[in-house]
Amino acid sequence: MATLLELKNLHTYYGQIHALKGIDLTVNEGEIVTLVGANGAGKSTTLRTISGIVRARSGQVLFNGQDVTQMQPHDIARMGIGHVPEGRRIFPQLTVHENLEIGAWNVKSKKDIEERIEHVFQLFPRLKERITQLGGTLSGGEQQMLAIGRALMAMPRVLLLDEPSMGLAPVLVEGIFEIIQRINEQGTTILLVEQNALMALEVAQRGYVLQTGKVVLHAPARDLLADEAVRKAYLGAH
Amino acid sequence: MASVSRGLAAPSWSLRLPPAVRWVYDYLLYPIGQMLVFIIGAAVVLTLLAYLLAALVPEPRPNIILADQISRQLPGMIISGISIGFVYAMIALGYTLVYGVLKFINFAHSEIFMVGSVVGFEIMRRIADSGTLQQWNPVVLIVTVVLVSMLVSGLLAVLIERIAYRPLRGAPRLVPLISAIGISFFLIDFVRATEAITRNDFNLRYPTDQLPWLTQSVALQFGTTTVNVKPTSFIVVGGAVLTLLALNYFVNGTKLGRGIRAVAQDQTTAALMGINVNFMISLTFFVGGAFGGAAGSLFGMNVGTVTPYVGFIPGIKAFTAAVLGGIGNITGALLGGLTLGLVEAFLNGVLVYFPALGQRYTDIFAFSVLILILIFRPSGLLGERVDEKV
């Protein structure tokens, strides 16, 4: 398997706070990799640093062998890194259709855009019913579908998913995880950040455990699920 | 969230109409209808208020029957109110677009308007100096003057943002505001110095006296009253309506407009979608500046003489209009501008009949409106919220 995304000794600060203290991580083409860990461990910061929203102070982000560490967020997005941000961040006053069109910002052909919108509607038929509604009027679950659909519009090679299950009813969470697997089967590599570590490790091939800005454990997801310490700390087992 | 939302745009159910019908509805019928509703609504409300005043104070001075005076002046007041209202609306758009995207009040915008009026003067003056002014087709002449001042003011606004605001983007909100005021003074003095050096005078008189079609009033008959309307009033209204329609199409009907709305609502997420946020901000300044420039040259043709100081009062009134309508809201800028223009025209017409009051006091009312709105409804007339679900 070819390495698609690689982080090398990545350090990120928020002002004085040292949020990432040397993260090393690889994501291979076709994989689902998950980052688990407690609140404030640096999971979201890792994704935000990859996308360029937060600048790394040192270290490297390599995408497909190319150093993207110092690139602008919109250029990183253009290279094929899709990011579904925490809290979905739907454009509240754009319609569902417009939100999806924005997702395909760098796609020139209108025909391609409409085809991709149709593809998103196949994944999320519910969105089609809401096509003329403003994003801000959707329910939480619908917004999550829209956020994922919007990111897929650019046909990214790797999709960064930040807490896709947050705030959703358990029934919807199952649905979202099924969709994540389907997207992966259709050829998109996925880096998944989740509070719901159990679900995340069930769909992922490999997992990284983050603690206060460092990778403390890294193993096949199956092994992490079986690991007593991990179960105790992150999976709510007693 | 006050943002560059759907502007004058038709409600989203129109997406269900067939495409051609939808285009006409979204970009012509709906915005024109909305402008008409605003004009008629504001005029009707003010007419009623004027007659109410006449009922309360029937004879403000001996032998002056207020109601009669109002009836005689009504059409004239409405026409002048609409034309000044559209000028305010066009300037207000510059404040509102930039505020919608950056949550920042560009206090140099009044000077971008001033530069537009001076550029309009320069073009007309140069054509007049070459002796060919009368040979120009009126439409071509006006379009040329307005387009060039739009271009210059638009580029100036982009330049100002790049030099004076972008480096301060992470700074506390007061800092770029002060920078804007500094830019404002700089522009006034720069234009003043340039004109003083090149023309030895900074009272810049548009050569409109050479153009009878621009200065000879048209007599319009309303019932028993005749109103003399300056042709420039029609040009101002026509120019404003056309540019507003173009803006509506740009914001709601084009990809770039969609990008601006996305950036206005959430810059970070817009960047994640591959949108170059800085480019979109520059574009917003360009469009807002261009509107200021168009308003400046139309205003210049209307009043005849401009100076480097001409921006301040219309600028601050347009800011009032933007706040009145709901800052950040494009439709609000239009409504606020028209309302303020009509209020002023009515006060201009009515105040002269009151002892110890006069037209000079009109501005007190305009700014009282600003203060009252800021106290009682800071979100403005149309500043409603669409809440985001988290």
Image: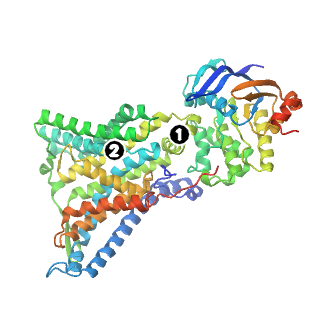
Q: Residue furthest left?
A: B200
- In percent of width and height, residue B146 lies at 28, 45
B368 lies left or right of B226: right
Lateral position of residue A187 relative to residue B276, left or right: right
Q: Which residue is mark 1?
A: B267
Residue toward you, A25 or B374: B374
* Quadrant of the frame with the C terminus of chain A: top right
Task: Tell me if I can see residue B238 in this picture.
Answer: no
Tag 1 secondary structure: helix
In front: mark 1 or mark 2? 2
- Check the residue under mark 2 and report the chain it is in: B
Write the residue at 85% across / 35% down.
A232
Q: CA distance from mark 1 to mark 2?
A: 22 Å
Categorize mark 2 by other alpha carbons within 10 Å: few (<14), some (14-19), many (20+): many
Work out which quarter of the rendered image holds the N terminus of chain A and state it: top right
Residue nearest the viewer, comparing A141 with B11: A141
The disc placed on residue B208 is none
Q: Do the residues marked 1 and 2 share a common chain?
A: yes
- Is any part of residue B313 visible from this angle? yes
Which element carries disc 2, helix, strand or loop? Answer: loop
Q: Residues within 10 Å of mark 1 (few under 14, many from 20)?
A: many
Residue at 69% in and 37% down? A162
Residue A73, picture quadrant: top right
- The earlier-in-sequence mark between 1 and 2 is 2
Q: How many marks?
A: 2
The kind of residue tagged 1 is Gln
Residue located beneath label 2 in the image: B107
Going by the numbered disc 2, the residue's amino acid type is: Phe
Query: Residue B385, position in %: x, y?
Result: 53, 56
Chain of the residue that carries numbered disc 1 in the rendered image: B
- Quarter-of-image position of residue B380: bottom left
